[in-house]
Image (spheres, rainbow, N blue to C red):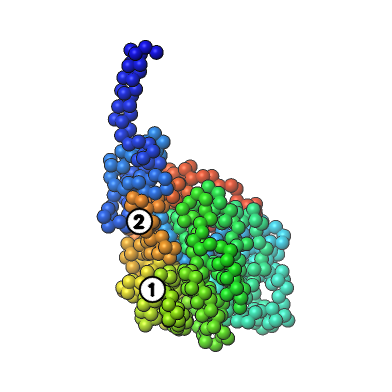
Amino acid sequence: MTYEKKGWFALVALILSAMVRVLWPHPANATEANLIVFNAKITTQDAKNPSPTALAVKDGKFLAVGTDEETKKLRGKETRVLDAGGRRLIPGLNDSHGHYVRGGRFYNSEVRWDGVPSLQIALNMIREQADRTPEGNWVRVIGGWSPFQFEEKRMPTPTELNQAAPDTPVFILYLYSMGFLNEAGLKALGVTVENAQEKAPPGGRYEVVDGRLTGRLLAEPDPTILYKTIGSLPPLSAEDQLNSTRHFFRELNRFGMTSAVDAGGGGHKYPVDYTGTALLAGSPDLPLRISYYLFPQQKGNEYREFVEWMANHGLFHDGALHLDHGYELEGAGEFLVWSAGDFENFTADRPDLTRRERWREDLKRVAQLLVERGWPLRIHATYDESIGHILDVFEEVDREERAAGRKGFVGIRWAVDHAETLKQANLERIKKLGGGVAIQNRMAFAGEYFIERYGAGVADHAPPVRALLDAGIPVGAGSDATRVSTYNPWISLYWLVTGRSVGGTPLLSAENRLSREEALELYTIGSAWFSQEEGVKGRIAPGQYADFALLNKDYFAVAEEEIRGIESVLTVTGGVIVYGAEEFAGLAPELPQVSPAWSPVKLFGGYYRTSEHRSEK
């Protein structure tokens, strides 16, 4: 090549390079965004930048948050740019206490009464599902509802259940207070008037009236009879459990959830029953960050279970291959030992831990092990009396550890779960020991029974949310889904803001209710504390995880009653679109067909939508 030709090519290259710099001023490998969303009302929860209109995402994190004009400068050839249409955009919601791995395991097998407005519709759902459920399987409604949400304001009767499903076994769970079996269900389980007392575990009974089984199962107050019944129902196959988990997590994304702290659960063994979520975590398609705690299953052998888990499973191990903090082992709980577990059954007397053999020795041994090994822990405790006894043990462990030259609870991330009747003295003890409190909207589903037993004057500060915040104690909001409350986070946010149950009953006093801003903060930043992620998620700011939701209604502008109807139209986890509706409907990955073919989810979906429920017709 001649010198002149070389010079000519060099000049052309220089001109093209200059044109590229003018048209695309930021190198693609440095500052070009993968995703830009503009024309939004963004709630950042970042005091330095409270209300921008646009955001840019790169490599799973927020790259920039600012004006439309500023953010569009980060657009590259491959950047996806979305117009939010002036909608409200918030950080992804994060439930600080739910049972989402277990929920995914069972979702496709369950009829969900969550949000169903009338008992008649609910019974029609039972009837329709019974007609399509193959022999050997059950129709099951496992929590997430309250009789007070129905227009009729009552429970189903045995006659109604038998008429809806005369030949197909049915089990319906209401919280951990009671359950309902139709005649076919009683027959399938082999329960008769003659053997009912023998078959019922201690603390529960099959109701008999006038020499006949009514089909009601009563926890008084121990829910083992309910756990036992659920455990006797046929499980989904491993393949269907994975499919179920995919569809359940998509359902959570529908409401703007991008994270959850999983509290294990009864009848849910680790690691064998975690297969669906573990397989999803190992794929590129995990749409939800899960931090999970380990819940022992063997009553009396909890210490041995924790020792085995510690030997075989690394604390903070992330099993997600494509999502930071995607599937992470976080610690121990919500039960540490069964003998120290109280029950949130407001239709029965409060349990007294001190009447149980070895509860104190069992709890101290496990707590000491966890503290010595530096494991985060959380413990289920509904009543102030239970919390006081538990704190006695924790404080004793702390003293002995310090006397031995160790740190005790210093540096241990620990929490009390639930705490509905927590009082000031124990609140101060929790703070002194460095703990947090995870609250849930269980009262929204059981508050009427709580008032009947304890009075409205106790219910108005159950739990004492304002006192916890005023004390500076870390607080996270959640649901305790799926067997107690619904998994829909907007029902919990509605309860925090209005103080009302799903049936409209006033519960929380005006002083104990939260502003919409405060409630949202507890469901994002507050919840992140319980997985030690408060530095990386909960805010929309550069460097934070790009987890957010674009809402169908403006949470800060709609009437209070409309909060319950909020959903996401665009949910993004780690910069990846995981849910889309309306003009964004085609952007999320397509899910496989619901399986098995008779799944109630295929017919009814999940949380109630009028247009999707044939039973309303």
Crowdedness near tag 2: few (<14), some (14–19) or many (≥20) residues, C-alpha within 10 Å: many
Dividing the picture into quadrants, the one containing residue 228 is: bottom right
Residue sitting at the far front: 405
The residue depicted at 32 percent of the width and 74 percent of the height is 471
In the foreground, 495 or 130: 495
Report the residue marked by disc 2. Answer: 539
Residue 60 percent location from the top left of the image: 42, 48
Where is residue 520 shown, x and y percent of the image?
36, 61
- The amino acid on which the numbered mark 1 sits, given as a three-letter code, is Gly
Which label belongs to residue 434? Answer: 1
Residue 518's place in the image compared with 215, above or below, is above
Which residue occupies 66% across, 66% down? 233
Instruction: Measure the C-alpha gap from mark 2 to mark 1.
Output: 24 Å
Residue 371's place in the image compared with 543, above or below, is below
Q: Nearer the viewer, residue 509 or 38?
A: 38
Residues packed near mark 1 inside 10 Å, few (<14), some (14 to 19) or many (20 plus): some
The label on residue 182 is none
Q: In this image, 404 relative to 277: left or right?
A: left
**Which residue does the image show at 57% across and 70% down from the upper left?**
307
Q: Name the residue nearer the viewer: 419 or 500.
A: 419
Residue farthest toward the left in the current orientation of the protein: 48
Quarter holding the N terminus is top left
**Horizontal side, residue 541 vs residue 450: left or right:** left
The answer to whether the residue labelled 2 contacts the one labelled 1, judged by CB atoms less than 8 Å apart, is no
- Residue at the limit of the structure toward the bottom, as seen here: 355
Q: Amino acid at mark 2?
A: Arg
Q: Quadrant of residue 166?
A: bottom right
Along the line of sight, the residue nearer the viewer: 124 or 363: 363
Q: In front of the other: label 2 or label 1?
A: 1
Mark nearer the N terminus (2 vs 1): 1
Residue 518: % across, % down: 33, 64
